Amino acid sequence: VFSNATCLDDKIDVYFTLVSALHSQGKMNQSLEVGLAVLSQLGESFPTYSDLKSIIVVEFVKTKQLIKEKTDDDFLTMNALADSHKIAAMRMMLLLAHHSFVTSREIFFLIILRMVQTTINHGICDESAFALASLGSMMGNT
């Protein structure tokens, strides 16, 4: 499939299957690496070898500020996410969030923060519910 695909859109469903298969085979790090590489192609790059704790703090503050600027009505009347690449990115981030919850909490937190930022900046989708609930849980623990 990869050799015959002409663009990322042709490959995206196969990438979801590959990431899930690698995770199911116990190849957690490889699954995460492939998923993060796909996210990068979708315009959502994640640092993996930096000081992740400092990055999480910065991203948490940024996310908290974005939320602070929104009212309940803003969330209730938020437009649906329409960009197909952002929707694919949200789907991949949800998959990786589930996978990284056990293997890399720092990556999990970054993914959740990015999902919330994407929701606020680009629109709401099915995956947004998980991100917002996870963020609520994270904020309750700080």
Image (cartoon, rainbow, N blue to C red):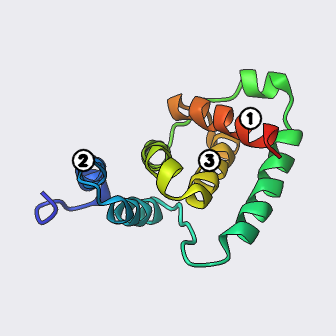
Whole-angstrom CA distance, mark 3 to mark 1, is 10 Å
Query: Mark 1 — residue?
Result: 136
Say which element carries label 2: helix
Question: Which picture quadrant has residue 105?
Answer: bottom right
Whole-angstrom CA distance, mark 2 to mark 3, is 21 Å
Are dots 2 and 1 in contact, CB under 8 Å?
A: no
Question: Which picture quadrant has residue 79?
Answer: top right
Q: Is residue 117 above or below residue 132?
A: below
Instruction: Residue at 33% x, 65% y: name it.
Output: 30
Q: Residues within 10 Å of mark 1 (few under 14, many from 20)?
A: few
Say which element carries label 3: helix
Q: Is residue 124 above or below residue 97?
A: above
Query: Mark 3 — residue?
Result: 112
Q: Is residue 17 left or right of residue 98?
A: left
Judge by depth and name the residue closer to the eye, 44 or 82: 44
Label 2 vs 3, first from the N-terminus: 2
Q: Is residue 66 visible?
A: yes
Give coordinates of residue 126: x percent, y percent.
Answer: 51, 28
Label 3 vs 1, first from the N-terminus: 3
Which amino acid type is marked by label 3?
Ile
